[in-house]
């Protein structure tokens, strides 16, 4: 039973109803429907999923028919005016989890209508889009936030804590890799895969982890990639890609990071969404590996397809709790709950006359505020531009950040010509 109406209530909307919704947003909304949201500053707050926008409405309506009672039902909208219809339904916040290149339009309409927004990573694909959304959020006095759930992974949090406390000192270099199975590019995302690459989709997790954990100024981005499995060998759709970012710190010292991603690893490889990071510091080393930290499980006729061989139970997993209640928990869900608490804090965390101060405080949280996503979006924009040039027959371009020619500038090897991707300061 929901407490909507009897308690201070946040009405929520969901844009997109695909894989990530099933893994994180759906369990969040189902749990909060039963248990409300608690913080001392707000008291209990009800959160109700009132509206869902998706491309065809099919998956949302199937869920409604089979499990809609778990969230108290919602309105399902599809088609060209679906976002406007969601806005008219009167939502306080909306979660945007449509495909990467369709975040901007939805966020723009929602923020423009004074709706708090949280958007899946990558927030948007260019700094121009980012500027527009941040300005809209400011103008309409709402929050614009982005989901980077890997910042909530206990292993990444522990690493950042050691850096924050000065135990691990000055990162020099590192690498990260994330390997997705072929089913992701071949089936799951088949409808929107053309022209996309796995770097924007998942390297962005590590761009943010590096940017947020170590600070510093992004200086240079380079990238390479491979094609021929998901699409044509010389087309715009990428199987795997490798990017390098160079940062400079206040000390004047630099660090370089390599991020490798793929979405064409065989479906039966035991690592399934295998994640690895290694960071090398002046005085230490951090090695993290999703399989080494984790669990390996085999069940006849079920692994690796129905049940994964290497389960990331920290991200999100269905459990029978020791007291025999069923739950679904993990850092992928925590990150959404935290956003809902932040919105509740703005709206119900004190008198209306102090809302502006509360909003400013929530906006200053740089782990998820869109205004603090500049270097991450810059790296994504650079990666996209470098891969696009490669697809057009111009390999090995380099993007430099905040140099004498602009904020984000693409250089071609052996040419004096350059292209300004973003004029302002990143
Ligand atoms: N945080 C993570 O680890 C993680 C994991 C997977 C996906 N994601 C992100 O979540 C987003 C969605 O990915 P997914 O895996 O759920 O994809 P998906 O293909 O499974 O689902 C996409 C959903 O968006 C809907 N949609 C498509 N076009 C739309 C439009 N124009 N307006 C509204 N809805 C539209 C579709 O109907 C579908 O419900 C992407 O941005 C992706 O990068 C994040």
Image (cartoon, helix red, strand yellow):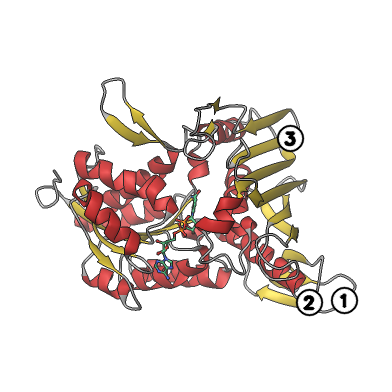
> Do residues under tags 1 and 2 come within 8 Å of each other at their CB atoms?
yes
Mark sitting earlier along the chain (3/2): 3
Q: Residue furthest right?
A: 414
Instruction: Residue at 82% x, 65% y: name it.
Output: 396
Q: Is residue 248 above or below residue 133?
A: above
Q: Secondary structure at mark 3?
A: strand
Instruction: Residue at 58% x, 57% y: name it.
Output: 185
Q: Where residue 280 is drawn, which disc sits there?
A: 3
Residue 50 shows in this picture: yes
- CA separation in Å, label 1 and label 3: 35 Å
Q: Would the CB of label 2 be found within 8 Å of ligand 1?
A: no
Is 406 or 232 nearer to us in this picture? 232
Q: Is residue 74 above or below residue 41?
A: below
**How far from the left and from the top, in percent, is residue 6?**
9, 48
**Neighbour tally class for label 1: few under 14, some 14-19, many 20 plus, Cα within 10 Å:** few
Residue, disc 2: 418
């Amino acid at each position: 039973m929901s407490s909507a109406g009897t308690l201070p209530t946040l009405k929520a909307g969901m844009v997109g109803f695909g894989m990530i919704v099933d893994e994180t947003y759906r369990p969040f909304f189902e749990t909060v429907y039963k248990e409300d949201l608690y913080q001392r500053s707000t008291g209990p707050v009800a959160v109700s999923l009132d509206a869902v926008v998706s491309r065809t409405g099919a998956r949302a309506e199937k869920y409604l028919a089979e499990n809609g009672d778990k969230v108290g039902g919602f309105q399902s909208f599809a088609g060209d005016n679906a976002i406007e219809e969601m806005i008219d339904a009167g939502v306080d916040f909306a979660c945007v989890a449509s495909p990467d290149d369709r975040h901007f339009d939805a966020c723009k309409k929602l923020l423009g209508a004074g709706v708090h927004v949280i958007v899946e990573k990558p927030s948007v694909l260019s700094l121009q889009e980012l500027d527009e959304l941040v300005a809209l959020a400011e103008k309409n006095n709402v929050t614009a936030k982005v989901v980077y759930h890997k910042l909530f992974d206990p292993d990444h949090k522990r690493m950042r804590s050691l850096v924050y406390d000065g135990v691990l000192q000055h990162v020099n270099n590192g690498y990260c890799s994330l390997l997705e199975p072929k089913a992701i590019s071949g089936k799951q995302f088949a409808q929107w895969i053309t022209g996309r690459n796995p770097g924007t989709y998942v390297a962005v997790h590590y761009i943010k982890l590096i940017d947020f954990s170590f600070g510093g100024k992004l200086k240079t981005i380079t990238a390479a990639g491979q094609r021929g499995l998901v699409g044509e060998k010389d087309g715009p759709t990428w199987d795997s890609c490798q990017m390098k970012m160079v940062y400079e710190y206040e000390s004047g010292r630099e660090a370089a990071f390599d991020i490798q991603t793929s979405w064409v690893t065989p479906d039966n490889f035991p690592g399934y969404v295998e994640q690895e990071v290694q960071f090398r510091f002046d005085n230490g080393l951090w090695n993290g590996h999703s399989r080494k930290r984790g669990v390996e499980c085999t069940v006849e006729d079920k692994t690796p397809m129905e049940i994964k061989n290497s389960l990331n139970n920290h991200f999100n997993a269905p459990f029978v709790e020791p007291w025999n209640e069923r739950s679904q928990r993990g850092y992928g869900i925590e990150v959404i709950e935290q956003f809902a608490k932040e919105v509740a804090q703005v709206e119900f965390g004190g008198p209306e006359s102090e809302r502006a101060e509360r909003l400013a405080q929530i906006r200053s949280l740089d782990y998820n505020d869109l205004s603090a996503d500049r270097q991450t979006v810059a790296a994504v924009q650079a990666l996209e531009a470098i891969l696009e040039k490669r697809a057009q027959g111009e390999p090995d371009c380099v993007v430099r950040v905040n140099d004498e020619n602009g904020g984000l500038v693409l250089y071609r090897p052996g040419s004096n010509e350059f292209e300004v991707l973003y004029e302002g300061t990143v």
